[in-house]
Image (cartoon, rainbow, N blue to C red):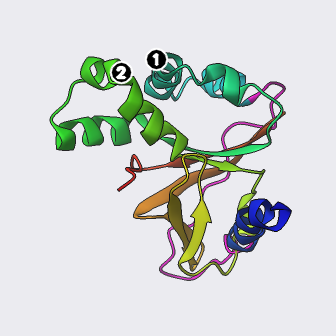
Amino acid sequence: MKLRFWAPIAALSIFAASCGSDGPDAAPVEESAVEVAVGDIVEVAIGAEQFPTLIAALQSAGLVETLQSAGPFTVFAPTEDAFAAALAALGLTADQLLADVDTLTSVLTYHVVPGKVMSSDLVGADGLAVGTVNGAEVNVSESMGTVTINSATVVAADIEASNGVIHVIDQVLLPS
């Protein structure tokens, strides 16, 4: 049982070690604009003022308290543009999505991995399957300094919180 819990964390550690390459065609992960912050993941996300849709979604789904617990957690936080694109693709308004708590919870927990995984832990990942909090897996890869989670690209990494880390992604991850 313990091995099953730690396997995704070990896999993410390998994945995280892959984010350091500086190849000529790479779109490397940017350094976080947010320094190591005091506060949990939710407080850091609110303080960054970059994630209003994510914060509203966490509140609607009742997940704020969970992401304020001890953790640690790794959160893949979609940008505002990513949420807008996902809503357009799904033909939904933000209010419609926020009202569907079951779907919202499934999508949000698909963006959270148990454990704290820094970008330096991701070097060399190649199609690594990693379990998320919702029970489904994401596919993690790194190539020439660019890290992808499924088809989303990590655009800012290592926004630290007292109970984990946030990596900003350019797409909303949708479980199958």
Circles 1, 2 touching at the beta carbon (< 8 Å): yes
Q: Is residue 139 above or below residue 152?
A: below
Where is residue 172 shown, x and y percent of the image? 39, 46
Q: Is residue 145 above or below residue 135?
A: below
SS assignment for the magenta stretch, majority: loop
| Image point (43%, 25%), residue name | 53
Residue closer to the observer: 155 or 13: 13
Residue closer to the observer: 130 or 77: 130
Where is residue 49 shown, x and y percent of the image? 56, 23
Would residue 144 appear left or right of 11 to someone viewing this image? left
Q: Callout 1: few (<14), some (14-19), or many (20+) C-alpha neighbours within 10 Å? A: some
Residue closer to the observer: 22 or 19: 19
User: Callout 2, which amino acid?
Assistant: Leu
| Image point (15%, 35%), residue name | 91
Q: Is residue 175 above or below residue 34?
A: below
Q: Is residue 133 magenta?
A: no
> In which quadrant of the rendered image does the N terminus lie?
bottom right
The quadrant holding residue 5 is bottom right
Would residue 83 appear left or right of 72 to someone viewing this image? left
- Which secondary structure lies at badge 2? helix
Q: Which residues are magenta?
A: 17-40
User: Callout 1, which amino acid?
Assistant: Ser
The CA span between labels 1 and 2 is 6 Å
- Disc sitting over residue 60 in the figure: 1
Q: Which residue is mark 2?
A: 98
> In which quadrant of the rendered image does the C terminus lie?
bottom left
